[in-house]
Amino acid sequence: MSDEHPGNKTPIIDGDLYKKLMMASLTWLRTNQESVNALNVFPVPDGDTGTNMVLTLQAAYDEISNSSEKHVGALAEKLAHGALMGARGNSGVILSQIWRGFSKGIGESEILDGKSLVEGLLQARDTAYKGVVRPVEGTILTVCKDMALAGEKALQESEDPYFLLNKVTEAAQVSVDYTPELLDVLKEAGVVDAGGKGLLHIFEGMLRYINDEPLDIEPIHVQPLSVIGKQEAINSAEPGQDYEVIVDFQPHNPLILEDYYQDLEEIGTSIQVGEGDGIYRMHIHVPTEKRYEPIDYTMTLGTITKVHIENLMVQMDPSTGQKKEEPIKLAKVSQGDVALVTISPGVGFSRIFASLGAAAIVEGGQTMNPSTQEIMAAFEDLPTDQVIILPNNKNILMAAKSAAELSVKKVEVIPTVTVPQGLAAMLRLIPGQELSQVAAEMQVAMSEIESGEITTAVREVEIDGIDVKEGEIISLHNGKLVGSNKTLKEGCITFLVTAKANDYELITMFYGENISQEDAESMAEFIQEEYPDQIIELQYGGQPHYQFILSIE
């Protein structure tokens, strides 16, 4: 990477160029979105850092995209506001704080010169660190700090903003690569920090625009076999792409992915390739007349071990003869009442929350973190100025707190990080009580619950001394990985033993959208046999990815 700016570009970043650089950052981050998502410490199918950062940056750019403003300082302020309102997930909230600090550092500067660029990075670092209660090194915070320090040092050599962008981006790359040395959980998982990687891509995007390099050529990523499949087939089916074809094969020779992708693009769309233990899995959507072509072509490259063909158009036809779901009825609140706003990961949970008195429900959970603005919109128009928010997910907590801080209403955020904690808290919602009293009761209630999550590992990794194999059933107890087993029964029992379920009275099992009611009932019967002295309840949660979410009380 050259430290010199191209001869056809000026080293002065005015308002127009600032907007173009932000658009380039967004484009390059979106191009690398899935690779950032893949940097998930836990082997669960819910990596969403890349998605959250893209949506946050998109909201930020939307604030300036149609603006005629030429003043960089004013544009930076608008962009920071958009990032704050559109922030999703912890990574998105921290990114919004970075842009907020960057805006403060630029201040009243009409252009982004070298000095204001470095001051922006310094303020970005300070603001981001202050926005986190317990800063952790080896994360996006560290990368931002190292970029600021590199900028300060490079400013002694030159005030050229292009030169400085090169230096801080180089520093970001070094910092990202070093994150596993600062955070043991990253080293154990064999990944770098996802948030830091996303921040690196943002600044890489600026440089790629300056250097006239392409921004929308997506790198080819080999994913774990288990994430190449049918879970999003219906929603992503394109017109004319009638069939989904999945082929497992062993190549005769080393597979050249670029050539393989290029040839498949002549056949269909939605192409994905995964690899595990020498077996490759290819996923593609094709029109009816081409449904066998991917198989025939792949057969020329290797030995096919498994084929799956599914008619997407049949799946998209509305089902008949099924009972129409009744609309969810939310609680009505008046002035002086405490309104309860809760985040729900599935329609089953939404119905339960509504039955317990929720005044507003925001769809969200793993892989679908709502933005600060979406959370605010849920309660800003309610006819009361007393609000409680239950995030029910650790990656929504920061956005919920941002919504509370931005609102003119009296808003309390109860730090529920699991859905069972949120349900337990809701049971303490007693009409007529003061906001502070209800909040205090809910804090106690959430601490009395043991939460469990059962899902399927999407990759091989060793964490906390547990050797996880791709495709195994993993168990989480209060968010901590506690076991990896061959069967769903073993996974459930591992959690229950770890949580000491024998010491409690009630075990509630919420089954997700990826397990049938019949199989869920069978599992509940098995658990009842293993725990005859406990009450076992089975309810539909409707959550994605997780076969079961469990609550013990």
Image (tube, grey):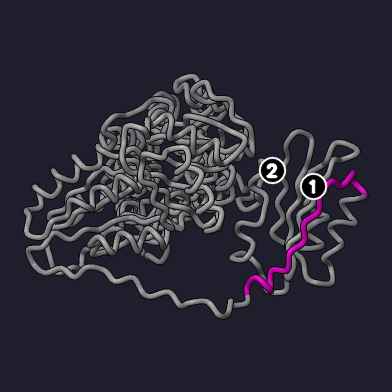
Q: Residue at x 41, y 44 (%)?
A: 550
Residue 28: % across, % down: 56, 49
CB contact under 8 Å: marks 2 and 1: yes
Which quadrant would residue 68 be assigned to in this image?
A: bottom left
Q: Secondary structure at mark 1?
A: strand
Q: Position of residue 411 (x, y in %)?
A: 16, 53
Specify the label residue 225 is tagged with: 2
Vertical comparison of 488 with 21: above or below: above
x and y percentages locating residue 399 in the rendered image: 31, 49
Residue 265 found in image quarter: bottom right
**Closest to the observer, 460 or 77:** 460
Name the residue tied to disc 1: 248
Q: Is residue 529 left or right of residue 105?
A: right
The Cα–Cα distance between marks 2 and 1, rounded to whole angstroms, is: 9 Å
Q: Amino acid at mark 2?
A: Leu
Left or right relative to 114: residue 331: left
- Front residue of this view, candidates 484 and 146: 484
Q: Residues within 10 Å of mark 1 (few under 14, many from 20)?
A: many
Which of the labelled discs sits on residue 212, or is there none? none
Q: Which stretch did the figure color magenta?
A: 300-316
Q: Is residue 412 left or right of residue 65?
A: left
Precedes in sequence: disc 2 or disc 1: 2
173 or 151, nearer to the observer: 173
Task: Work out whether residue 550 can be spotted.
Answer: yes
Query: In the picture provided, is 364 more to the left or to the right than 245?
Result: left
Q: Quadrant of the C terminus?
A: top left
